[in-house]
Image (cartoon, grey):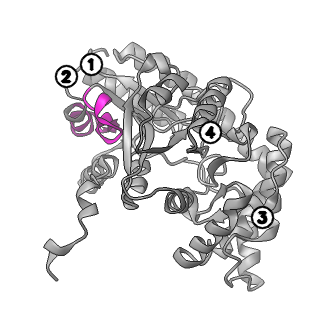
């Protein structure tokens, strides 16, 4: 095979540095080094017993066949009821498409909405895969630098100022990876109004919405039926490897998404879907809420600890399990600093390089999706590394 004939779109897909650092860490661990992982955004909690038991029953009962491309009707109804009980929203189950993780949901949304040459606005910093989903359909992610003053998010003014003839929509995340910050309800409403005025689409990634700590959670779905929302069982529900998520779309978009899902995925894993039903039982919700409280406890430990080490944390995260920390007082190159911290302190952190050019050299992402004991040990190692012990 002539590798020079690979599709040119691959030229626009950058390596994912968090995974590169994870590989480096694995090599050190094979050599006997103790490594504390605060890089990959994966809960250290796994699916609780009710979910495991539901999966086991599904396999024992032979519930292993394909489902409808839009998902098990019972799971669509359970998710709909979840929106009613948590957010006070009446979302028709038919608008909910169960997907093979949030990644599949984003892929389906971009496949349906992004034309070749179309621009999609998103903040810089953003989760890197989001811009690659746009690029996969020959669109262009337009990264708009956003700093602490905007909580690393887009604002109504930024969307209005940057909209041009090629712009077709916005792709937001609230709470965000890598920053853990949310867009305020009123600001999000203003953004949606501008996009609506321009005839564009608004996609909001809400995979961390269940992990909101300081305010009552809300969903962008409260802003109107034209808002497209992505969600997942990976973060709040602790089911990362199960590859199960969902997409909520306007009623007149359901058939298009169903058609794409039939062709690209057939359906999400049937076992994962049957297991996912157990996530909405009172027993499971109590477990998830206790784990959410633990994530908040970890946040409240790590933010002041990072400041004590000399990192700037200009915006306290209100959700997810990340802190976006300014390392410019400690080093002039975040990428080089993370490599040194890995090799010399045995702590994995992620440079801003993954998340957009405006913060690439100045910021690192800290994941506190690990035990309190690991966080405390990591801080002790970093105190020694920076000569603050």
Residue at image point 64% right, 55% down: 233
Q: Is residue 213 left or right of residue 379?
A: right
Which residue is disc 1 drawn over?
328
Answer whether labels 1 and 3 touch (C-beta < 8 Å).
Answer: no
Residue at image point 58% right, 66% down: 100
Look at the numbered disc 2 and give the secondary structure of its residue: loop
Kindly identify which numbered label has been placed on residue 332: 2
Which residue is disc 3 drawn over?
75
Residue 109 sits in which quadrant? Answer: bottom right
Q: In the rendering, at what x and y percent does residue 346 appear?
A: 29, 38
How would you classify the magenta stretch by its main secondary structure?
A: helix
- Which residues are the magenta region? 337-361
Residue 355 lies in the magenta-colored region:
yes
Q: Is residue 206 left or right of residue 345?
A: right
Q: Is residue 246 left or right of residue 165?
A: right
First along the sequence among labels 3 and 4: 3
Q: Residues within 10 Å of mark 4 (few under 14, many from 20)?
A: some
Taking depth in this image into account, of 184 and 378 the one nearest to the observer is 184
Kindly identify which numbered label has been placed on residue 196: 4
Distance between the Cα atoms at labels 2 and 3?
49 Å
């Amino acid at each position: 095979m002539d590798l020079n004939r690979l599709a040119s779109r691959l030229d626009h897909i950058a390596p994912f540095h968090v995974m590169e650092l994870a590989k480096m860490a694995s090599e050190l661990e094979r050599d006997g080094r103790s490594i504390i992982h605060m890089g990959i955004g994966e809960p250290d909690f796994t699916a609780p017993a009710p979910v495991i038991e539901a999966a086991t029953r599904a396999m024992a009962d032979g519930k292993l066949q394909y489902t409808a491309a839009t998902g098990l009707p019972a799971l669509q109804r359970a998710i709909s009821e979840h929106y009613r009980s948590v957010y006070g929203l009446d979302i028709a189950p038919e608008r909910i498409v169960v997907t093979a993780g949030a990644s599949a949901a984003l892929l389906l949304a971009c496949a349906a909405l992004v034309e070749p040459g179309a621009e999609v606005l998103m903040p810089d910093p953003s989760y890197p895969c989001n811009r690659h989903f746009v690029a996969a359909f020959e669109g262009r992610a337009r990264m708009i630098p956003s700093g602490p003053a905007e909580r690393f998010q887009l604002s109504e003014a930024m969307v209005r100022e940057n909209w041009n003839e090629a712009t077709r929509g916005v792709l937001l995340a609230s709470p965000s990876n890598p920053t853990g910050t949310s867009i305020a309800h009123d600001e999000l409403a203003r953004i949606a109004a501008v996009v609506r005025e321009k005839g564009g689409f608004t996609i909001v990634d809400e995979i961390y919405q269940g992990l909101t700590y300081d305010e009552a959670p809300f969903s962008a779905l409260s802003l109107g039926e034209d808002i497209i929302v992505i969600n997942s069982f990976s973060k709040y529900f602790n089911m990362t490897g199960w590859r199960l998520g969902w997409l909520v779309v306007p009623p007149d978009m359901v058939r298009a998404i169903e058609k794409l899902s039939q062709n690209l995925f057939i359906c999400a894993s049937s076992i994962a879907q049957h297991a996912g039903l157990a996530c909405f039982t009172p027993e499971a919700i109590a477990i998830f809420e206790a784990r959410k409280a633990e994530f908040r406890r970890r946040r409240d430990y790590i933010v002041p600890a990072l400041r004590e080490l000399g990192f700037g944390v200009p915006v306290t995260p209100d959700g997810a399990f990340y802190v976006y920390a300014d390392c410019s007082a400690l080093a002039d190159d975040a990428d080089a600093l993370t490599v040194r911290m890995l090799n010399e302190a045995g702590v994995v952190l992620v440079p801003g390089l993954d998340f957009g050019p405006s913060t690439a050299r100045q910021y690192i992402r800290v994941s506190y999706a690990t035990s309190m004991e690991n966080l405390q040990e990591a801080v002790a190692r970093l105190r020694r590394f920076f000569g603050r012990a």
